[in-house]
Amino acid sequence: MLQRVRAAAALAGPLGLAGLLASTDLEAAAPDLEPFFGAYVGVAEVEDPKTGDVRQRDMDIVIEPYDEDGFMVHWINVTLVDGRRDLPGVERRVQTALFEKADDRDMYVEATAKNPFREREETEPMRGDPVRWASIDGNTLHVYAFVVTEDGAYELQIYDRVLTDKGIDIRFQRIVDDQVLRRIVGTTARAR
């Protein structure tokens, strides 16, 4: 099933995303998120397939419950320079994504943080807002992000977090119009 979702997402293009989300067959019982909850620290290699350039990255990941049946993923990536954090050019990136259980589907959709003082903003994919969703397949938490770029092309990011005896292994791909522009492979250990 996962291969079918990935293949369909890669071929969906900007206008086919709505049909993909509506037609994907996900009928299994709701998977258990609890094994994924925790804090993880580790390292990864970031590869640019076009140039062959490989960079080192430190990672901190926190996955925890959100709302009644959703989850939050918070991650910090520190891209190293010559394997070090104390040199000019080190990049630090912090991101958070919230997911709620989809109605009548065995998947999760991105949610916005609840704020009683602000109106909820609608996602506008055709204006470049990312559409994110997640699913669990056995010991793997898959998170997808789909973006329609300014020139009408599409970008698909696939972020797999695979449970291991020690923590979570990371596999990431950034695909733009059928070309893989970035790969990340990493490993983490559960932090205490």
Image (cartoon, rainbow, N blue to C red):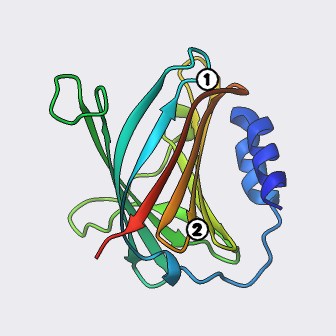
Residue 169: x, y in percent? Answer: 53, 58
Relative placement, left or right, of 26 versus 151 is right
- Kindly identify which numbered label has been placed on residue 49: 1
Quarter of the picture containing the C terminus is: bottom left
Residue 51's image quarter? top right
Disc 2 is placed on an element classified as strand
Q: Which percent across, then down, holds residue 141?
A: 59, 65
Sort mark 1 into few (<14), some (14-19) or many (20+) by Cα contacts within 10 Å.
few
Where residue 111 appears, as percent x and y from the top left, is 45, 63
Q: Is residue 166 left or right of residue 66?
A: right
Q: Which residue is depicted at the point 73% across and 27% down?
A: 178
Amino acid carrying label 1: it is Pro
Q: Which mark is residue 108?
A: 2
Mark 2 crowd level (few <14, some 14–19, many ≥20, 10 Å Cα): many
- Point 72% across, 55% down: residue: 21
Quadrant assignment for the N terminus:
bottom right
Residue 83 rendering spot, x and y as whole percentages: 31, 33
Q: Amino acid at mark 2?
A: Tyr
Checking the image for residue 132, the label placed there is: none
